[in-house]
Each structure stands twice: as C-alpha cells, then as structure tokens.
Amino acid sequence: MQAVTQDSYGPADVLELREVADPTVGDDEVLIAVRAAGVDRGVVHLMTGLPYVVRLAGYGVRAPKNPVPGMDVAGVVVATGRDVTRFAVGDEVLGIGRGTFAEAAVAPETKLVHKPADLSFPQAAALAISGLTALQAVRDHAMVEPGDKVLVLGASGGVGSFAVQIAKAFGAHVTGVSSARKASLVADLGADEVIDYATTDFSATGIRYDAIIDIGGNSSLSRLRRALAPQGHLVITGGENGGRWIGGTDRQLRALALSPFVSQSLGTFISSENSDDLAELVGLVEQGHVRPHIDRTYPLTDTAEAVQYVADGRAIGKVVVVPTQTAA
C-alpha cells in the first residue's frame, strides 16, 4: 500500500510517500481502508520530535518508533481481529488509529465509533483527537455549566473550534480569542463575542471569566489569572513556546504547582482516547451542536504540505489528508 513515512525527526520534508507492507491487525484491532486522516498539532510534534519530552514519552529517542505518522482516521472496516465485537467488515468508522497517513491503518476497537451517515469522511476524520480534547477540557476540567462566561484562546484552531461549539452546547456565554483574519469563523461557530488578540488585551477588559480554556497559547499565567473569576477554572491544553526541551509545558507545571494555594483552579490534562467520549462527541454532532470545520483537504501525495500548513499556524479549523480521492 501507499503510505507517508519518516525515518528521522525533522521538518516536513522528512515525510516521504512510499510503498510499504499492509499493517498487521491485532486481536482487539480493526483494519481500516482510510478514506480521510486528520492533521493536528500532535502530528507536528511527533514529526519534529520537539519538544524533546515527546521523544522521552516513548515515541522514540533518536527516530520515530512508528515510521508512518497520523492518528485521526475515518474509513471503512476491511478486517477485524478475533476479539472485536463492535464492528464488522463494511462498517464506516471514525476514531484514533496509528499510521493513518496511508491507504490502510489499524486502530484499537476501544478508540473507534460508527461514523454518522450525515458526516463526510473528511469531517469525520477531523473529529476525534481535537474534539475529544475540547470535550474533556470543557466538561471535565473547566466544568462548564449553563450561564458560565467562558473564554477560549486559540478559538479558530482545531481544538478551539470544537471548544467554542461544545461550550455553547453546554449553555455557556462564549468569548473567542483569535486573529482578525479568523474572527468570522469563530463567530460562525457560535461565539457570542470575538476578541482580536492584536488589538485587545483580554485581561484588561475588566471581565472575569468562570472558565478559561487556553489552547496552544503563550499568555503568562499571571495574565490568565487576571481574567479568571476568583473561583474560576483555568485549563491549559498546550503551548507552542518555551524551547526545545519542554516546549510550552512550563506554564502547565507552574499552574499545577500554584493551584493548591489559590482559590482559582489552575491546571492541565492529557486527553483520554476512549470510545465512550467519542460516542458523546458524535451525539453532539447528531444533535446539531457540533460540526467540524474543514479548512483544506490534501491528497496523500501532498501530506508534507498539509502538515506544514498546520505547523505554520495558518489553519482555520481542521486540515485533512484524503488518500483515495482528489482533495477538494
């Protein structure tokens, strides 16, 4: 089969399209004919091996353990392991697999759900990783309730675009922070207000938010706390600054260290990849509360370009690779 591969860490030009052997299916796994595969910031970190904590987390110290990148997937089941009970050949599925920038990929049964009929394969492939992170940030860590004032930093990106919609579905008043170029999307997603970070300092408006969800931002912890209500919840889901060793994780570590000593809840989390939360996310889609926004799709041959587009911060919503058809 055709697959995108990488033999070393580095920029997007380490990605090459090659002929490789079909993946082997484990007892609790499903083999999927890939119809679309999502691109998220995690793919960029695993491609570059930066920050170095990524390598120490088990993905390979000198080179990637998995030579085929990609995690988000949507496609059709073509084979199942002997212990799989929830899926059969021919089922259309979405979820999280490994090596999804390919014509075929495997995924654990526990990280898949059936694809809603009214979602296209590219939309379905954009849902799992970013949508799960947003759902768990809003529901479990920000503890958003009806009437809460919620601030979403990075509201136009993959996770942010879902966080805005999910917070609205939970009954919150949502303010999104983005660039002026991306503000119209944030408003279309349902944000009640949109702040252009280039012209307005969210921490100087005098508004105190019940929850702040900071996605890949670089605002200081003190600045975030100024905008947070005394009993509010701050959830930092990532950071793109801070050097080659720890990246932006220093803010998360300082937030966790400070939280026990202040009235505000300050923290971070690692998303749980599970089918129960995927099912809840799909339910929000089927109820009309959530819809993936696809910025661009790319053919498998242009995967390096797709990943670079995300790495450059140009994506508005999600970017998807489509192995088996010409990208729109």
Image (cartoon, rainbow, N blue to C red):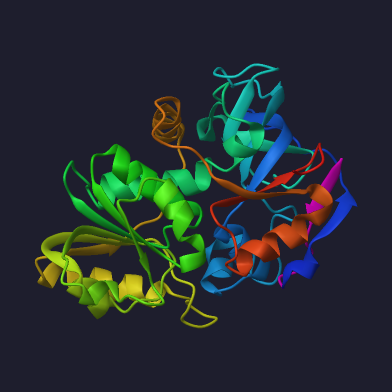
Q: Residue at x 44, y 25 (%)?
A: 286
Can residue 271 be seen from the camera position used here? no
Q: Position of residue 319 (x, y in %)?
A: 63, 51
User: Which image quadrant: the N terminus?
Assistant: top right
Q: Check the image and report above or below for 275 versus 151.
A: above
Depth check, front residue: 319 or 37: 319
**Residue 7: which quarter of the image?**
bottom right
Depth check, front residue: 248 or 163: 163
Q: Residue at x 41, y 70 (%)?
A: 217
In the displayed orientation, state which residue is furthest to the bottom: 243
What segment carries the magenta color?
1-10
User: Which image quadrant: the C terminus?
Assistant: top right
In the displayed orientation, state which residue is furthest to the right: 19
Q: Position of residue 51 (x, y in %)?
A: 55, 74
Which secondary structure type mostly characterizes the magenta part of the structure? Answer: loop
- 4 in magenta: yes
Q: Residue at x 20, y 70 (%)?
A: 227
Can residue 247 be seen from the camera position used here? yes
Q: Check the image and report above or below for 252 versus 128.
A: below
- 130 in magenta: no
**Residue 17: which quarter of the image?**
bottom right
User: Left or right of 140: which side holds 101?
Assistant: right
Q: Position of residue 91 (x, y in %)?
A: 65, 19
Q: How many marks?
A: 0
User: Left or right of 2: which side holds 28?
Assistant: left
Q: Position of residue 237 (x, y in %)?
A: 39, 61
Q: Check the image and report above or below for 29 versus 217.
A: above
Depth check, front residue: 268 or 230: 230
